[in-house]
Amino acid sequence: MKSFSVIFSIWMFLTFLPLHADGQRQVRSLDRSGNANYNDSLYHDAEMDYRRALSINPTDSVARFNLATTLIRQHDQAKLAEADSLLTGLIVEAEQTGNRQLSARSLYQKGEIAMMVQQYQQAADAFKESLKRNPGDNDARFNYLLAKRQLDKQNQDQNQDQNQQDQQNQDQQQQQNQDQQDQDQNQDQNQQDQQQNQDQQQPDNQDQNQMSEDQRQSILEQNEREEKETQAKVMRRQQEQDKDKERERQIQLQNGTLKDW
């Protein structure tokens, strides 16, 4: 980006500086000192000179423009904002007074500020307006084309970033859909496995129930057998006792100890 290397000369605006002769000489002296420091890249010292000049005459257009230019060269956000404000005021005054040169250069400097903060649309607009007021300014024309080129690149990068973001969102959505589909399939498979296990377990339960019924029947039959055996033992024992009693009675009859009435 091409920048002005020389700030406004003092003589250009003398007609716009109605001030007492002594005060005017002090302002012009401070302007010259500021210009010398500016050309030596001593921007802080130049800034102090222009501020002292403005303390004498706050409406001095030369000092205000040169202060704005010096603030721009220091690349400080707060100073860029102050410079932009100074230039806006100068443009309004220049348009009102018909000072096309001051308006053109102030617009040019606003374009430089916009380029620094990558506001390429604002920069292109400022350089374009500067060219309208000074069509022969090749630096303004170069910077206008540069701002347009940077604007096109910025829009292209933004579109590319947006396309990449859209693609990422689409891929993410597809992955989420695939994950959900896999989850649904796994859930269906688990349900099928559970149903199959239940179907396999049902005959086993029937077998267990059948086995339990057989066991109960076997126990009943065994109990019946044991009861019959017990009754048979009791009957045999009773029969043996009866036999014993009969033998004893026969012996007693034989011995005469028992009468058979």
Image (cartoon, rainbow, N blue to C red):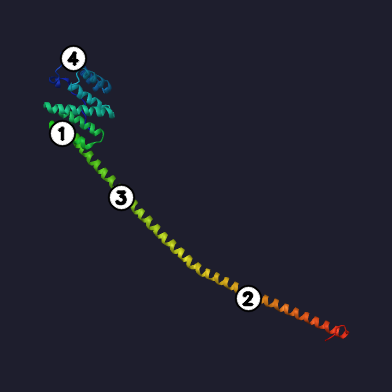
* Residue at image mark 2: 221
What residue is shown at x 67% (from left), y 76% (from top)? Answer: 227
Query: How much space separates mark 3 and mark 2, taking CA atoms?
Result: 80 Å
Mark sitting earlier along the chain (2/4) = 4
Tag 1: amino acid = Glu
Residue 36 figure quarter: top left
* Residue at image mark 4: 23
Mark sitting earlier along the chain (1/2) = 1
> For this rendering, which residue is in front, 141 or 230?
230
- What secondary structure is marked by label 4? helix
* Residue at image mark 3: 167
- What secondary structure is marked by label 2? helix
Mark sitting earlier along the chain (3/2) = 3
* Residue at image mark 1: 129
> For this rendering, which residue is in front, 91 or 146?
91
- Nearer the observer, disc 2 or disc 4? 2
User: Residue 100: x, y in percent?
Assistant: 12, 28
Tag 3: amino acid = Gln
